[in-house]
């Protein structure tokens, strides 16, 4: 499975990744620090105790993506190579994916008469042909690397071990929500980069599957209860009719 390793300590905020992404996806190159339907990656700046820090945000391409699990028509799906890809031709515009994404990444064309979803495609076509992502290819400092996920995890661990005072002792995306195909190493807290810190290690779809697995027995129990109520109600009416008939017969005697 392919992945990206983003080393925040190496990012200089040049925006080459943004320009390459826009060119690759035929998007307008405009100044923005917010993800949008026409902006699949952004470079932001945050002030910390270590000074100004630049970092990228984009779709995390979860190993077991919640967005794909809630899509009722299969417009989003995880490919074996790593990308979570979107098929606008089958999208029904329900926007469940917006609610499901723990990283708040997908963006919607609210002003369009034929709205679509906008998010990073992980350059799926380039990967399929044996290439690398446009952003990684354009990065002049090596802040973004593209490769096999297992190899990038080894590289991240090696960098942390070689300079323990430089990096936080953690790889963001290694375990979060079952793991992601975009990994971060950093010298500042990940929360400062807008990355949520309170995510579980289990894939979010696993919670849905657990809840759904309880539906058959619960449905069976509910059916029995409803059937019992139906029988009692009808039995009550039947007894009432018999009692009424008996009273009428006794009154005629």
Image: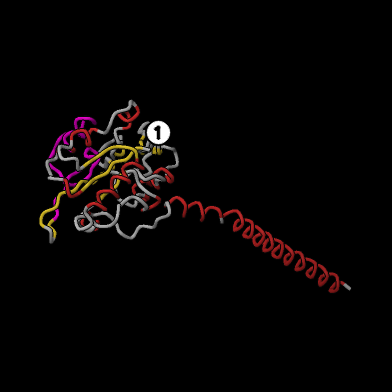
Whether residue 148 sits left or right of residue 249 in the image: it is left
Query: Which residue is farthest front?
Result: 162
Disc 1 target residue: 90
Label 1 SS: loop
Report if residue 30 lies within the magenta region.
yes
Q: Nearer the viewer, residue 253 or 223?
A: 223
Q: Position of residue 48 (x, y in %)?
A: 14, 59
Extreme top residue here?
129
Confirm whether the magenta stretch covers residue 25. yes
Q: Is 101 drawn above or below residue 248 in the view shown?
A: above
Please indicate, yes or no, whether residue 203 appears anywhere in the rendered image: yes
Q: Position of residue 104 (x, y in %)?
A: 30, 50
Residue displayed at 40% across by 36% down: 79
Can residue 106 be seen here? The reply is: no
**Measured along the vertical axis of the image, is residue 92 above or below residue 218?**
above
- Eyeballing the image, is 157 above or below 14? below
Residue 37 rendering spot, x and y as whole percentages: 25, 40
Give 226 or 59, whichever is nearer the viewer.
59
User: Which residue is at a point 36% across and 43% down the rendered structure image?
Assistant: 150
Quarter of the image with the N terminus is top left
Left or right for 195, reference 69: left
Q: How is the image coloured?
A: secondary structure
Picture residue at 24% right of the left edge, 49% below the top = 159
Q: Position of residue 45 (x, y in %)?
A: 14, 51
Quick one: quadrant of the C terminus?
bottom right
Q: Count of labels shown?
A: 1
* Start-end of magenta stretch: 18-46
Most foreground residue, 163 or 26: 163
The residue carrying pointer 1 sits among few (fewer than 14), some (14 to 19) or many (20 or more) residues within 10 Å by Cα, namely: few
Q: Nearer the viewer, residue 28 or 191?
A: 191
Residue 47 drawn above or below residue 77: below
């Amino acid at each position: 499975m392919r992945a990206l390793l983003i080393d925040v300590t190496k990012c200089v905020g040049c925006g080459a990744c943004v320009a390459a992404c826009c060119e690759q996806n035929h998007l307008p190159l405009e100044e923005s620090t917010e993800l949008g339907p026409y902006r699949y990656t952004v470079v932001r700046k945050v002030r910390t105790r270590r000074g100004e820090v630049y970092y990228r945000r984009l779709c995390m391409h979860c190993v077991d993506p919640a967005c794909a699990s809630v899509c009722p028509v299969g417009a989003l799906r995880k490919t074996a190579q790593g990308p979570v890809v979107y098929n606008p031709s089958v999208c029904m515009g329900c926007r469940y994916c917006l609610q499901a994404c723990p990283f708040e990444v997908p963006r919607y064309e609210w002003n369009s008469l034929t709205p679509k979803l906008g998010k990073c495609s992980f350059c799926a076509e380039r990967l399929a042909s044996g290439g690398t992502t446009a952003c990684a290819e354009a990065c002049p400092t090596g802040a973004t690397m593209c490769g096999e996920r297992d190899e990038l995890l080894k590289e991240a661990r090696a960098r942390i071990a070689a300079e323990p005072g430089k990096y936080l002792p953690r790889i963001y995306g290694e375990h979060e929500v079952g793991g992601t195909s975009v990994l971060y190493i950093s010298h500042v807290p990940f929360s400062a980069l807008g990355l949520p810190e309170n995510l579980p290690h289990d894939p979010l779809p696993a919670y849905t599957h657990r809840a759904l697995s309880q539906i058959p027995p619960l449905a069976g129990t509910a059916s029995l209860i409803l059937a019992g109520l139906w029988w009692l109600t009808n039995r009550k009416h039947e007894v009432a009719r018999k009692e009424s008939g008996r009273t009428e017969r006794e009154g005629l005697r």
